[in-house]
Image: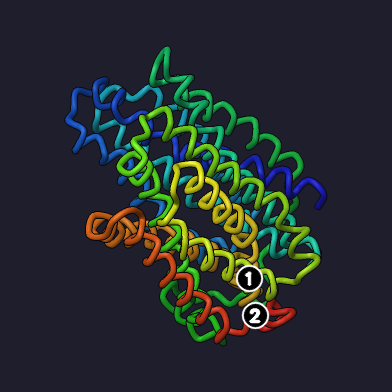
Amino acid sequence: MRRVPALSFAVMLLVGTDTFLVAPLLPALSARFAVPPARAGWMVSAYAVGYCLTALVAGPVSDRLDRRRVLVAGMAAFSVSTAATGLAWSFTSMLGLRLAASVAAAVASPQIWATIAQVMPRERVVPAMATATAGLTIAQLLGVPAGSLLAVRSTSDPFVVVGAGGALVTAALWRWFPAVPPHGGTVRVGLLAQYAALARTPRALGRFGAYLVFQVGNFAVLSFAATWFARDFHLDQAGIARAMIVLGAGNTVGALIGPRVVRRAGQGRALLGGSVCYLLIYAVVAASPTRWVGVALLAGAFTVGGVLFPVMMNLLQALTTSARGTVSALASVLMYAGSTLAGIVGGPLLAALPSFWGVSLLALATTSGALGLWATSGCLRAEPGAGGRG
């Protein structure tokens, strides 16, 4: 079990890099395939749609299988489809290969969160989830800039390199990842019945609702911070990139120090304290007198997010012992849903109010709403994870 956190980090680093890889390459890919920017955005949408639709099916199905086999198969397909993306010969083939990569990622990545909750000792679950979270945050912090640099020679190179890395990780998973057979109490039922059973689990609706509401505010801040920096502080593209790297670094630091915070404070106090920190930051960030005050405050918020994300995932996984793949998949879908809602609501709010007030008020509202839902679903107690059932 000692290798599970390191292998989980590697999987999430690669999947995260692949997820974030296309957006900064859109101008170059648009020119490569001779399509307008509006159509080029479909390459991002194809990945998101493919991931969500696949996860809804793959999560429940994986609960009936050995997670090691599902993970290895998913990562093998991910490696091949991502490397093949670099060889795309047309815009249509690019869309198809991005869709294939998203399907493979949706099969593989939920197994990480489910496996950690299933095989790690209870006291090591949050630290292991924090290690996997660090893979995602480092992918955003370093993976995307590295991909952009690799694309200087050719837009094919980043995909080939990520695919090759995926092949190495797949081999490591085959060699060292433990077998994770389905839980003994798993009963074969239809997909809809499996989701219905999860919804009937005590506190499930409250916890999933809290996670969705939290992600709306979280992604609103992430999505529109760069626009705020450019509009109010007149940062150019390089300045925005540096600011976003600082925010990503805060997220990574939070993931790294999170286990120590949770060990000392407990999950309930960490969640409550982190939410209060969010509220304090979002209450004042829009009044930042300089760009670096704004960046510093948002970096603090992102650090809190790095601490809390593994806690939230553990609280969701604690709802059940027999449908953890379903939980992981649903959490991923809700994260994408939160991102979509943030884009729909956050843009008009940013335009309607001065400075960052529109987005920060949205984040205040979602943080308060999520905190209320966490509280009503028993998550602010000393040991909330013991409340679920199989």
Which residue is depicted at the point 41% across and 72% down?
Answer: 365
Along the viewing direction, whichever of 354 and 386 lies nearer the viewer = 354
Q: Which residue is mark 1?
A: 271
Q: Position of residue 61 (x, y in %)?
A: 51, 63
Going by the numbered disc 2, the residue's amino acid type is: Leu
**Outermost residue toward the front in this view:** 289
Task: For mark 1, give the secondary structure.
Answer: helix
Q: Are marks 1 and 2 in contact (CB under 8 Å)?
A: yes
Tell whether 205 sits left or right of 225. right
Instruction: State whether residue 314 is above or below residue 234.
Output: below
Query: Of callouts 1 and 2, which one flags the residue occurring earlier in the amino acid sequence?
Result: 1
Q: Position of residue 179 (x, y in %)?
A: 73, 54
Along the viewing direction, whichever of 79 and 341 lies nearer the viewer = 341
Which residue is depicted at the point 48% across and 38% down?
Answer: 243
Which residue is depicted at the point 45% across and 77% down?
Answer: 369
Task: For mark 2, give the secondary structure.
Answer: loop
**Outermost residue toward the top in this view:** 153
Q: Locate the C terminus by quadrant.
A: bottom right
Q: Position of residue 159 (x, y in %)?
A: 46, 27
How far apart, in angstroms, are the residues tagged by discs 1 and 2? 7 Å
Tell whether 151 sits left or right of 380. left
Instruction: State whether residue 132 is above or below residue 144.
Output: below
Q: Which residue is mark 2?
A: 380
Going by the numbered disc 1, the residue's amino acid type is: Leu
Which residue is depicted at the point 69% across and 64% down?
Answer: 117
Along the viewing direction, whichever of 386 and 102 lies nearer the viewer = 386
Instruction: State whether residue 15 is above or below residue 181.
Output: above
The reply to whether residue 1 is in sight is yes
Q: Position of residue 215 (x, y in %)?
A: 45, 63
